[in-house]
Image: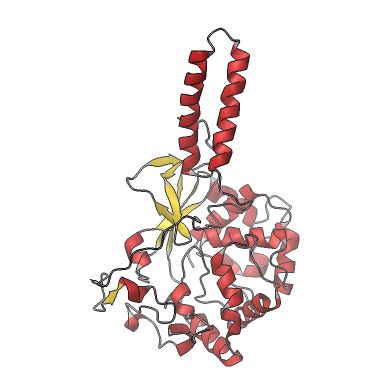
Amino acid sequence: MRLFVSAPTSSRYRAADECVRGYTFVYSICMGHSRLVLLSIFFLLCAFVALADSPSQSTPYWAFCLNPDSAAPAQLDNSPRHVPGSKAVFTVAETKDLFSLPDWHPNQHPPMPRIVSHGRKPDVYACGYCHLPNGLGRPENSSLAGLPPDYIIHQIADFRSGARKSSEPKHLPVTNMITRETKATGDEILAAAHYFSELEIKPWIRVVETGTVPKTHVAGWMLVAEAPAASEPIGQRIIEMPEDVERTELRDDTSGFVAYVPEGSLKKGKWLAAGADGKLAPCAKCHGPRLRGSGNVPPIAGRSPSYIVRQLFDMKSGARSGALSLQMRRQVLKLNIDDMIAIAAYVSSLKP
């Protein structure tokens, strides 16, 4: 059943089935009525159920993932946990400590400054908890590995001044940056910026063009596959999810992500990024050859497509209004959401 090919959530597909059952019921009690009346009732029922099941947000739900308000707190167990390739042992409760990140692979990165590994209680969360010791992050936040240190420092200043916010007020990762991480001292910010800038950005996200994707729901501020497994049309969405959700939830920084993108996205994105449509300046003009950065302009090749869409959306909406963002805004104002999807898919598919 594909009545809602462009619907943003799997619940809308279930809504379509409910509508069909509703139509059958109405038909059985209105046999003498005209087909026009029946069709009108059918579409009204569909609209009512679909609206009732929609996420209450104006931003693309798959890019600005919001935990459901009804989500129950996870039951933490204290049994020892392991991940492949590591001798370390942590309990689930320990992996949830925002002031002490679980470092599964300490030999795979330089020594972390204390602000990265532990933060500063009670004000500043450990930077590496969200962005991971390898700096590659998760879909709900940003990849910091290999960014220019001055760029990182500038972004913290924008969070602090109000020049960088989120188009989605309920998006907790950005709220945490504003309310928590801006309380870091100048020395702490400098130490964290230099740590992450010196990390090598590595392939972390597998980009796949497809017409069908796993059904997902939001958990932990990102998309995860439903159980039992099922599939649905991708529509105009990017579905970015963990390759191994258990390892991702344990903060294993050797377990990456897969991003499913609509068929044809890479070709269209390459065309747009090159400025071939005449509307946009080539991305490489500022972001450098192969989009690997230039001076204080960040490298964007191989970064999270969900994150890239969020930033384009935020620049267009004005949620990001810092000096560097305003330079981008002149270009981003020309983009619609389909353009953003294509550009993000292409950029993310590039070798970092």
Please report the residue visible at 43 percent of the width from the left and 40 percent of the height from the top.
Answer: 232
Locate residue 77 relative to residue 289 in the image: left or right: left
Q: Nearer the viewer, residue 349 or 33?
A: 33
Q: Position of residue 259 (x, y in %)?
A: 46, 55
Please report the residue visible at 62 percent of the width from the left and 53 percent of the height from the top.
Answer: 59
Which residue reaches farthest front? 29
How many numbered marks does the figure carry?
0
Residue 85 sits in quarter: bottom left
30 to 346, vertically: above or below: above
Question: In this orientation, does residue 281 appear?
Answer: no
Q: Position of residue 53 (x, y in %)?
A: 53, 42
Q: Position of residue 29 (x, y in %)?
A: 51, 14
Q: How is the image coloured?
A: secondary structure
Residue 165 sits in quarter: bottom right
8 to 133, vertically: above or below: above
Q: Nearer the viewer, residue 15 or 347?
A: 15
Question: In this orientation, does residue 337 appear?
Answer: yes
Which residue reaches farthest bottom? 187
Residue 51 sits in quarter: top right
The N terminus lies in quadrant: top left
Locate residue 206 relative to residue 51 in the image: left or right: left
Please report the residue visible at 71 percent of the width from the left and 59 percent of the height from the top.
Answer: 317
Please report the residue visible at 37 percent of the width from the left and 72 percent of the height from the top.
Answer: 253
Q: Nearer the viewer, residue 49 or 265?
A: 49
Which residue reaches farthest top? 32
310 to 47, vertically: above or below: below
